[in-house]
Image (tube, rainbow, N blue to C red):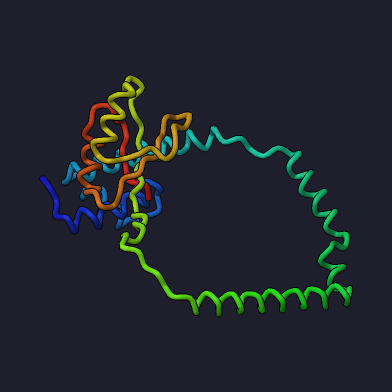
Amino acid sequence: MTCSKNFYESMRELIPLYVKGLLSDSQKAEVEKASDEHPELRMEIEQWKKIQRLYKTIEGDIPQPSSAVYSRVAARIKEHDQPGFFERFLTSRKLTLAFIAGQFLVILALGIYTYITQTKPEYRTLSAPPAKTEDSVKIHIVFKETAAEADIRKLLLQVHARIINGPSRSGLYVIEIPSREDVGKSLSILQGNTIAEVAEKAY
């Protein structure tokens, strides 16, 4: 049984909160009922749970700062207790006046430059303006360990994606798809492919 697009999207927005245990009892019950009735929502929940487990693995790989870091920070704070250049600058009248004079000269130079450049004739070329950088959509994906590099490359080219980060120690990649592509269709291709274990839009 498939669900309407509006219903699917409303339930889909609740899934990250459901997986993190942040929904009220009524909302939780609503998501669970919807997932029982609609396989696509149940599959979405499983994808999120996989990603959550991967994140926990990644967090375990990040080293904690050593006590030496805190010692260095404390030493820096003590150094800054001494009056620095800025404090000495504020107490020196000559330096303050020199700074103000320098600012005045910079403003004057900018004014002259602006006047000169505005009086010059404007030339336009027949070339098109530079293209604007399009927005993109990021997707988290984990490939199977048995996936060949050629198959991964072929799959990414099929959805016009490029790898922008990864792999992490747990095998998580971040890929980017241009927003002009049909992101829903691209995501379906990634999720339905035999070499991908997890593929989910990054939020």
Q: Is residue 108 left or right of residue 19?
A: right
- Tell me the residue at 36%/40% (across/down): 175
Return the residue nearer the eye: 5 or 16.
Answer: 5
Q: Is residue 182 left or right of residue 66?
A: left
Q: Is 127 displayed left or right of 118 in the figure?
A: left
Residue 111 picture location, percent across and down: 61, 79
Q: Position of residue 193 (x, y in %)?
A: 23, 31
Q: For the point 34% across and 55% down, which residue is it? A: 134
Count of marks, rendered view: 0
Q: Quadrant of residue 47?
A: top left
Where is residue 158, by image quadrant?
top left
Of the pair 177 and 60, the residue shown nearer to us: 177
State left or right for residue 97 relative to residue 34.
Answer: right
Question: Height in image: 3 above or below 45?
Answer: below
Outermost front residue: 121
From the viewer's side, name the closer residue of 96 and 123: 123
Q: Compared with residue 2, is residue 117 higher up or lower down, i.e. above or below?
A: below
Position of residue 31 measured from the top left corner of the image (x, y, whole percent): 26, 51
Where residue 160 appears, as percent x and y from the top left, is 27, 41
Residue drawn 85% across the image and 72% down it: 95
What is the residue that sits farthest to the left in this orientation? 1
The residue that appears at 85% across and 54% down in the rendered structure is 79
Q: Quadrant of the N terminus?
A: top left
Of residues 150 and 122, the one drawn nearer to the viewer in this rendering: 122
Q: Tell me if residue 187 comes above or below residue 95 in the rendering.
A: above
